[in-house]
């Protein structure tokens, strides 16, 4: 259990935003990068679908409250472009994103293995 | 016996909460009551295989029973994670919801895979370094509180309970489809078989079992898909790609579907649901993934921290193989439906099997899927009952009530807990309150609203106090149950749907925990040192 950086255990306060020591600092930095990619690619894309949707192609939806609202159906170049036979957005969400999740996990494992070796 | 009372009250609470009046009866998938011979043989052969594998790797003592001896490799561990994870909700329920709701239900697919990124990056390594048996163990020690330990153990049991209800429904429907016995009888028979093998094999057996079950799940899920794609005239070498064209035809017409009956609402993102609800659902399932005790518990099984992390990668890959395929079943089912194929009793929760029937495949092919669905449900119920029993025997009985209990007594209590839990689930499963994937989503919402914030802050902010943990759990439970009971037509129910309550619940619990922490006395030095170790001891 040799540590490269000796830290005085007297004032250890663990905080994601204020990491202690070189190891944790680098680790947290990488985590943040991965989480940002994860969030933007997954949720950002859904917002994009809404943003680029054809404003003239609307549908009426009945909410649970009984209220009927009109909103865009989401039709846009992203949904009308064919990719591998799919409507593009469907392929992106149902297939590409899952592959990206695996890649992000793989990337992080590679990174942290290397970091642990450097600091062992 | 105190623990009995505790357990009973948790059970009664859950039963009362779940069994309000208006539940629809489950569709009878086999109205003629005829036994389907080949599917029956397939399924019985599989069950014998599982029990045999379980017996061959019988658990020796309590440590084995809970943490499987801590000696499983990366790929093997990944397969175990995957089969433990993939339940009737993945195998049957997910395709069912995609069949009904199209693009909206892709939120299930993403929620149940994307959560692993969070789990890996924020928790897996730290939890393994911490090195205890169960999730409530971590909560009890990190928050230096017996109350927190007890509460989290009860929540763990509740989560197992709700989650299992969905599995029992899947098992019941498949037994009904195969044997022609009624859904209710099927639930009883299925429960007997599940309990028998969990008790015989314990978790060491269960881990081996899970690997076998994973292989069964993948093979049974993949094979029929090639033939369905082929029958319907789509690219069948890789049906996971081939269904894309079917989707296109569903929305635009083509391949026998006229433009008049085409349903663009199936693939358009906001044609039937709102963006808010898509995101609420996806976030809830992702956070729930990182907050489910039986998933977190798998990391204790691994000897090395690096292995714990790599298991996640392998686990996710193994899961993805099935999740890339489920939307294909849904699309093919939908396509046949629009074509007007008739003569099949369709239930959304059985669409995977129905899709094979609709495409005109022989019965034994659909039987493959039914048998696979039962494997999926069994492997998960096994893990859930183990996690529930561990919370009961280890966290409540041993850690709180009888710290002097011997290994033998603990083992016995674990077995009693398994049986009590396994049997009590029947009560609710007989009248399932919703579709399989929706029931399971409630379990995820509960995990997200309670365990996720406690683990997140517990690991990443040493200032979090015991009072905050307790307050967090109370608020989390209140949101989860509140979302089930607010009137369905209220504005509140619009913003907090019962399957997606974590979109409001988790931020709220986090705020409460931070505020309460800052108002109460800082945790002791030992807790901070423990946390430092959890982050740095390589």
Image: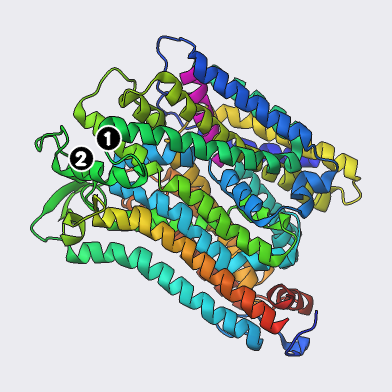
| Quadrant assignment for the C terminus of chain A | bottom right
Label 1 environment density (alpha carbons within 10 Å; few <14, some 14–19, many ≥20) = many
Is B370 displayed left or right of A53 in the figure? right
Query: Residue B323: x percent and y percent?
Result: 44, 47
Residue at horizontal 71 percent and vertical 85 percent from the top: A12
Residue interval drawn in magenta: B163-181
Q: Is residue B113 above or below residue B524?
A: above
Which residue is the site of mark 2?
A: B250
Q: Is residue B330 above or below residue B529?
A: above
- Secondary structure mostly seen in magenta is helix
Quadrant in the rendering for residue B191: top right
Residue at horizontal 45 percent and vertical 33 percent from the top: B433
Residue at horizontal 46 percent and vertical 9 percent from the top: B34
Label 2 environment density (alpha carbons within 10 Å; few <14, some 14–19, many ≥20) = many
| Mark linked to residue B334 | 1
Labels 2 and 1 within one chain: yes
Give the color scheme: rainbow, by chain, secondary structure or one colour.
Answer: rainbow
Is residue B166 found inside the magenta-colored segment of the image?
yes
Foreground of the two, A114 or B26 = A114
Q: Is residue B202 above or below residue A29?
A: above
Is residue A12 found inside the magenta-colored segment of the image?
no
| Quadrant assignment for the N terminus of chain A | bottom right
Q: Is residue B226 visible?
A: yes
Please state the total of marks drawn on the protein image. Answer: 2
Query: Residue B483: x percent and y percent?
Result: 44, 49
Mark 2 and 1 residues: CB-CB less than 8 Å, in contact? yes
Q: Chain of mark 2?
A: B
């Amino acid at each position: 259990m040799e540590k490269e950086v000796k830290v005085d255990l007297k004032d250890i306060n663990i905080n994601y935003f204020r990491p202690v020591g070189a190891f944790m600092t680098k680790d947290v930095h990488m985590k943040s990068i991965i989480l940002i990619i994860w969030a933007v690619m997954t949720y950002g894309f859904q917002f994009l679908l809404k943003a680029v949707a054809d404003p003239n192609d609307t549908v009426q939806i009945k909410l649970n409250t009984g209220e009927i609202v009109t909103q865009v159906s989401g039709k846009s170049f992203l949904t009308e472009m064919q990719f591998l036979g799919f409507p593009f957005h469907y392929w992106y969400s149902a297939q590409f994103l899952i592959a990206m999740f695996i890649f992000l996990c793989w990337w992080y494992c590679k990174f942290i293995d290397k970091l642990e070796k450097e600091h062992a | 016996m105190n623990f009995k009372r505790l357990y009973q009250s948790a059970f009664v609470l859950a039963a009362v909460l779940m069994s309000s009046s208006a539940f629809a009866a489950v569709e009878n998938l086999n109205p003629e009551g005829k036994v389907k011979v080949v599917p029956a043989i397939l399924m019985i052969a599989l069950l014998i295989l599982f029990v045999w594998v379980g017996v061959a790797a019988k658990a020796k003592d309590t440590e084995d029973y809970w943490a499987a001896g801590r000696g499983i490799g990366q790929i093997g561990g990944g397969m175990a994670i995957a089969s433990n994870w993939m339940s009737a909700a993945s195998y049957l329920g997910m395709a069912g919801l995609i069949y009904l709701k199209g693009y909206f239900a892709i939120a299930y697919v993403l929620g149940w895979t994307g959560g692993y990124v969070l789990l890996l990056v924020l928790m897996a390594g730290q939890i393994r370094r911490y090195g205890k048996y169960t999730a409530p163990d971590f909560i009890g020690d990190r928050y230096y509180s017996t109350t927190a330990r007890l509460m989290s153990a009860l929540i763990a049991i509740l989560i197992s309970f709700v989650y299992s209800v969905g599995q029992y429904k899947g098992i019941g429907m498949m037994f009904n489809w195969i044997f022609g016995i009624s859904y209710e009888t099927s639930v009883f028979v299925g429960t007997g078989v599940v309990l028998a093998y969990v008790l015989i094999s314990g978790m060491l057996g269960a881990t081996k079992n899970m690997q076998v079950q994973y292989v069964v799940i993948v093979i049974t899920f993949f094979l029929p898909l090639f033939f369905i794609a082929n029958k319907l005239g789509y690219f069948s070498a890789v049906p996971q790609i081939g269904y894309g064209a079917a989707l296109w035809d569903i929305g635009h017409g083509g391949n026998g579907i006229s433009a008049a009956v085409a349903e663009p609402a199936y693939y358009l993102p906001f044609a039937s649901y709102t963006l808010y609800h898509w995101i609420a659902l996806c976030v809830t399932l992702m956070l729930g993934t990182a907050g489910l005790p039986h998933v977190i518990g798998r990391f204790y099984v691994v000897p090395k921290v690096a292995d714990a992390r790599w298991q996640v990668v392998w686990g996710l890959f193994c899961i993805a193989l099935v999740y890339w395929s489920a939307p294909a079943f849904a699309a093919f089912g939908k396509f046949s439906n629009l074509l007007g194929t008739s003569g099949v009793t369709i239930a959304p929760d059985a669409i995977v099997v129905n899709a094979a029937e609709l495409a005109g495949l022989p019965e034994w092919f659909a039987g493959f899927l039914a048998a696979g669905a039962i494997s999926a449900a069994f492997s998960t119920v096994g893990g859930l009952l183990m996690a529930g029993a561990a919370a009961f025997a280890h966290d409540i009985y041993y850690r709180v009530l009888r710290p002097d209990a011997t290994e033998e007594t603990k083992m016995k209590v674990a077995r009693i807990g398994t049986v009590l839990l396994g049997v009590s689930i029947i009560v609710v499963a007989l009248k399932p309150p919703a579709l399989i994937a929706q029931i399971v989503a409630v379990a995820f919402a509960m995990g997200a609203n309670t365990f996720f914030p406690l683990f997140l802050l517990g690991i990443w902010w040493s200032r979090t106090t015991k009072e905050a943990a307790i307050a967090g759990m109370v608020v989390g439970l209140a949101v989860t149950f509140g979302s089930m009971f607010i009137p369905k037509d209220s504005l509140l129910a619009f913003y907090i749907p019962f399957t997606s309550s974590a979109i409001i619940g988790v931020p709220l619990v986090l705020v409460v925990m931070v505020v309460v922490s800052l108002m109460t006395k800082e945790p002791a030095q030992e807790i901070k040192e423990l946390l430092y170790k959890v982050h740095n001891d390589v």
